[in-house]
């Protein structure tokens, strides 16, 4: 049977960055082709930027208009149009989210002015699998960002919000897509996405990616390899099992930038490098996950998930310190994970009737970190205006500290709809325990039980427009729970007040969101006995405006603006890496 040939539409994109065009080819067949069959070549399949049913805001099937919190979604189509390869490329245009340096070695985002390094999720499960590196988008269907504290759903953390990556699934389609792109700074990317139905009950899919790139900074480069097979098994009607495996190998030069003098970066050519020519970071991460969904009937759904992450990492980095006159001090710091593992179990039962949706769930999360650390402080200072580049000493890797963070949570959510009004209530109980064993020291412990909540009200003005208000509280572990500081022996808590409006326009093709929020965080300070002796209070308040979707069938737009007023309530000082104003615009028009 001959198939219809289609041509790839030409896309013209105006955005905050320039992305080199990608050469995309795919091969689609429903069966093994015979000699007389025609194999079709496809280009980009247009799908749009609007996602009406993101699950991260409630963990269930609740329409975006009925979620009492700001939720942004970067769809597969938008990521393709942007030429996004890493997570940082996808989040470049999300209101209220800004990228930080991440010590030149990892993804690290600020959401509403709070660090979200340890608030990354994969399919709703906490994901530390590529914590100290850059995340690939090769097997990501879309990225969902919940803004504001979300501890009532996800537990500890999430002061500013969470980022959830949704995995591509083996849906039984038969295709092979091959993509290649070339970018600035000698970036070369090759990708393969292949899917097929093995039988009527077993489907498979695999994503592969290789990336290499230099930098505008001398001596800085990176190489990535990523492979992610997934299998879907349909053993009986109503039962779905997804088995995912991800492996990522990444090599890069960790680069922290130029020194600062009098509060400003030293004025140097952008290609100037500070560091050792033998600085490096090398990591291997493995993630295995199983997702089992049982649809008992039209009203009951039971989800069970499990995931295991394993990271091995070494980093040698030459860091710049204090500037005195025209010289800057230098220190070589080596650290590694030998290894770092994360184990997560989750079970959720959802009961839905015409007017009510009830979810009850439980989860378990344990992070084990075997940290190695060594340093060399004997380096002579560098001239900040004429640095001498060469190899620096390598102090090796020595056992330094073992940490275990264990969290067990129980939670419930109820969504009750009464005409045009929806009430959303969440309560979560967490038991958290931290253990720390430093080399040559006694074991330290920190534990507590906390309750998080969210109360939301949504009113449908009409079928396409809603307004909402919500209150929420979340708890944070100092240093995200990765180590214990005796002077921070009490958990932080964060409170959210938010009102907003959401709307669909142009036959639901365009999504609009406006949010006004205030986030207050209290950070208790303790003595070595654990007694609270002081506290730091911060307030982040602002507004976010966002539009995503189609203007016409050929014209897509993604635009966002946020204003943030963030300060320490006692001193009035602003936190690092926080912008008052953020604006982004991405527009794509397809001819033909």
Image (cartoon, grey):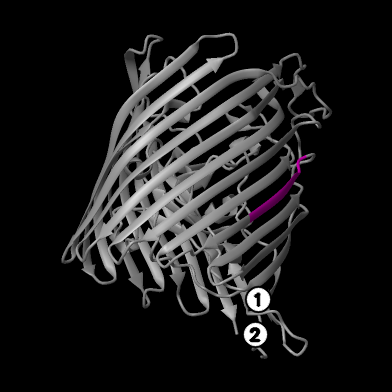
Q: How many marks?
A: 2
Task: Rate crowding at label 2 as few (under 14), some (14 to 19) or many (20 or more) other CA atoms within 10 Å.
Answer: few
For the N terminus, give its image quadrant: bottom right
**Contact, mark 1 vs mark 2 (Cβ under 8 Å):** yes
Q: Which residue is mark 2?
A: 6
Q: Residue at x 76, y 24 (%)?
A: 383
Q: In x, y percent, where is residue 355?
A: 19, 63
Q: In x, y percent, where is residue 226?
A: 68, 51
Q: Residue at x 49, y 64 (%)?
A: 234
In the image: residue 563, left or right of residue 242? left
Q: Earlier in the sequence, mark 1 or mark 2?
A: 2
Q: Residue at x 43, y 65 (%)?
A: 51
Task: Rate crowding at label 1 as few (under 14), some (14 to 19) or many (20 or more) other CA atoms within 10 Å.
Answer: some
- Residue 221 located within the stretch drawn in magenta: yes
Q: Nearer the viewer, residue 54 or 204?
A: 204
Residue 464 picture quarter: bottom left
Q: In x, y percent, where is residue 552?
A: 47, 79
Q: Secondary structure at mark 2?
A: loop
Q: Secondary structure at mark 1?
A: loop
Q: Nearer the viewer, residue 340 or 211?
A: 340
Residue 16 makes an appearance in the image: no
Q: In x, y percent, where is residue 569?
A: 33, 29
Q: Which residue is mark 1?
A: 43
Q: Residue at x 30, y 55 (%)?
A: 350
Q: Main secondary structure of the magenta part?
A: strand
Tell me: residue 467, above or below residue 265. Answer: below
Give the Cα distance between marks 1 and 2: 8 Å
Residue 402 picture quarter: top right
Residue 323 got which mark?
Answer: none
For the C terminus, give its image quadrant: bottom right
Q: Please state the extent of the stretch shown in magenta in the rendering.
A: 220-228
């Amino acid at each position: 049977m001959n198939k219809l040939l289609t041509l790839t539409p030409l896309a013209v994109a105006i955005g905050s960055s320039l992305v080199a065009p990608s050469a995309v080819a795919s091969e689609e067949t429903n069966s093994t082709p015979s000699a007389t069959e025609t194999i079709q070549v496809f280009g980009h399949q247009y799908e749009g930027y609007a996602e009406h049913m993101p699950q991260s805001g409630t963990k269930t099937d609740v329409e975006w208009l009925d979620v009492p919190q700001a939720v942004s979604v970067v769809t597969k189509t938008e990521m393709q149009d942007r030429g996004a390869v890493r997570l940082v490329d996808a989040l470049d245009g999300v209101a209220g989210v800004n990228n930080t340096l991440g010590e030149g070695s990892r993804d690290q985002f600020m959401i509403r002015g709070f660090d979200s390094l340890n608030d990354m999720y994969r399919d709703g499960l906490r994901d530390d699998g590529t914590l100290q590196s850059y995340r690939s988008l090769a097997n990501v269907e879309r990225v969902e960002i919940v803004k504001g504290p979300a501890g009532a759903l996800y537990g500890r953390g999430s002061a500013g919000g969470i980022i959830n990556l949704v995995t591509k699934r083996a849906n039984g389609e038969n295709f092979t897509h091959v993509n290649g792109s070339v970018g600035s700074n000698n970036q070369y990317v090759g990708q393969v996405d292949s899917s097929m139905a093995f039988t009527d009950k077993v489907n498979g899919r695999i994503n592969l990616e290789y990336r290499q790139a230099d930098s505008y900074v001398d001596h800085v480069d990176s190489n990535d390899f990523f492979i992610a097979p997934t299998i879907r098994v349909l053993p009986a009607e109503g039962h779905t099992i997804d088995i995912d495996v991800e492996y990522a190998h990444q090599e890069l030069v960790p680069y922290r930038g130029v020194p600062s003098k009098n509060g400003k970066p030293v004025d140097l050519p952008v290609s100037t490098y500070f560091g050792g020519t033998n600085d490096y970071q090398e990591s291997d991460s493995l993630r295995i996950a199983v997702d089992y969904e049982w649809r008992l009937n039209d009203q009951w759904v039971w989800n069970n998930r499990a995931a295991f992450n394993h990271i091995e990492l070494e980093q040698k980095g030459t860091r710049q310190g204090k500037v005195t006159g025209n010289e800057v001090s230098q220190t070589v710091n080596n650290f590694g994970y030998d290894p770092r593992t994360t184990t997560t179990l989750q079970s959720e039962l959802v009961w839905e009737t015409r007017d009510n949706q009830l979810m009850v769930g439980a989860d378990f999360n344990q992070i084990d970190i075997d940290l190695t650390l060594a340093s060399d402080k004997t380096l002579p200072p560098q001239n900040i205006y004429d640095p001498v580049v060469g190899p620096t000493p390598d102090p090796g890797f020595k056992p330094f500290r073992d940490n275990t963070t264990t969290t067990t949570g129980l939670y419930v959510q109820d969504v009750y709809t009464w005409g045009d009004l929806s009430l959303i209530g969440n309560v979560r109980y967490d038991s958290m325990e931290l253990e720390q064993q430093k080399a040559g020291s006694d074991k330290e412990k920190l534990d507590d039980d906390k309750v998080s909540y969210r109360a939301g009200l949504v009113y449908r003005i009409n079928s396409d427009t809603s307004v909402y208000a919500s209150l929420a509280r979340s708890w944070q572990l100092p240093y995200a729970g990765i180590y214990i500081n005796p002077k921070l022996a009490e958990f932080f808590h964060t409170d959210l007040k938010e009102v907003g409006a959401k709307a669909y326009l142009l036959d639901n093709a365009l999504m609009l969101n406006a949010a006004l929020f205030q986030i207050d965080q209290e950070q208790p300070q303790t003595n070595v006995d654990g007694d609270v002796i002081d506290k730091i209070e911060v307030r982040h308040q602002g507004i976010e405006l966002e539009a995503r979707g189609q203007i016409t069938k050929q014209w897509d737009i993604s635009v966002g603006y946020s204003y943030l007023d963030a300060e320490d309530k006692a001193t009035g000082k602003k936190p690092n890496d926080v912008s008052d104003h953020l604006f982004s615009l991405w527009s794509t028009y397809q001819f033909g």
